[in-house]
Image (tube, rainbow, N blue to C red):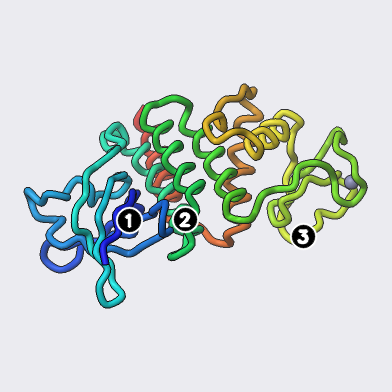
Amino acid sequence: MFLTTKALVLREVKYKEADKILTVLTASDGKLTVKARGAARKGCKYGAAAQQLCYSDVTLFHNAGKWSLNEAETVEQFLPLRSDLSLLALGSYFAELLEAVSDEDDPNPALLQLGLNSLYALSRGLYPPERVKAVFELRLTCLSGFQPQLAACPACGRADAAELRFSLGGGTIHCPGCPPGAPGRSVPISPDTLAAMRYVVKAEPRRIFSFQLPPEAERQLGEIAEGYVQAQLDRGFGALDYWKNVQCAMSNVQ
Ligand SMILES: [Zn+2]
């Protein structure tokens, strides 16, 4: 059986002499594991498409429970990411997150679109990488069933207390005196940061990055988004650690 679809490569692992095993995210069939025979060989017709973070029109072949790559034509390679170590590391983190929340036979086109929009914003330098990262993390939680509840404190109903906190475990705002509603850490959230989070959760897919935020609130948004996605998915991410190491090494050089 053949399947023609569009696919973003989330992960590539070299296999045997010149093959690759790809983890791809498709709009039609969710996450798939695909063997790309000869993809690591020079001159392979789909060599470019079989790289991590490449988005392509693909034809896949299904046989005996396994998928293999038959044809591929690249649609977007996000080339600027490939010449910037820090951006590539961040893009890999996005791929790791997409893989973590995707399933086979459970298509989530909005999730793929979020990944593509975020990689595009990152590769074209449309917004600072930290902004793209925070928005991506936050929207990813929304699209995978962990949308934070930001309207009011669930315990007392207040929406405008001066010193609200955000529960990373529960995904709710709450007043300092009210219980967080779920176990785990809760952190201070400023009115500016809360407004930005409310915007990101509700905004049209193409508008998610477009908002103004003072630097202090931008930092806080970054910490909350990262802490929230880790608390909800209950795991760390190797590519995130790597991105932080690259950031650190680059700031030492400058
Ligand atoms: Zn309260």
* Total residue callouts: 3
Beta carbon at label 2 within 8 Å of ligand 1 = no
Beta carbon at label 1 within 8 Å of ligand 1 = no
Mark 3 vs 1: CB contact within 8 A? no
Residue 35 or 90: which is nearer the viewer?
Answer: 35
User: Which amino acid type is shown beneath numbered disc 1?
Assistant: Arg
Within 10 Å of disc 2 (Cα), the crowding (few <14, some 14-19, many 20+) is few
Q: Which residue is mark 3?
A: 182
Beta carbon at label 3 within 8 Å of ligand 1 = no
Q: Which residue is mark 2?
A: 237
At x 81%, y 54%, the residue is: 180
Residue 123 or 206: which is nearer the viewer?
Answer: 206
Residue 182 appears left or right of 57: right
Q: What number is the disc on residue 113?
A: none
At x 66%, y 30%, the residue is: 217
Q: Quadrant of the N terminus?
A: bottom left
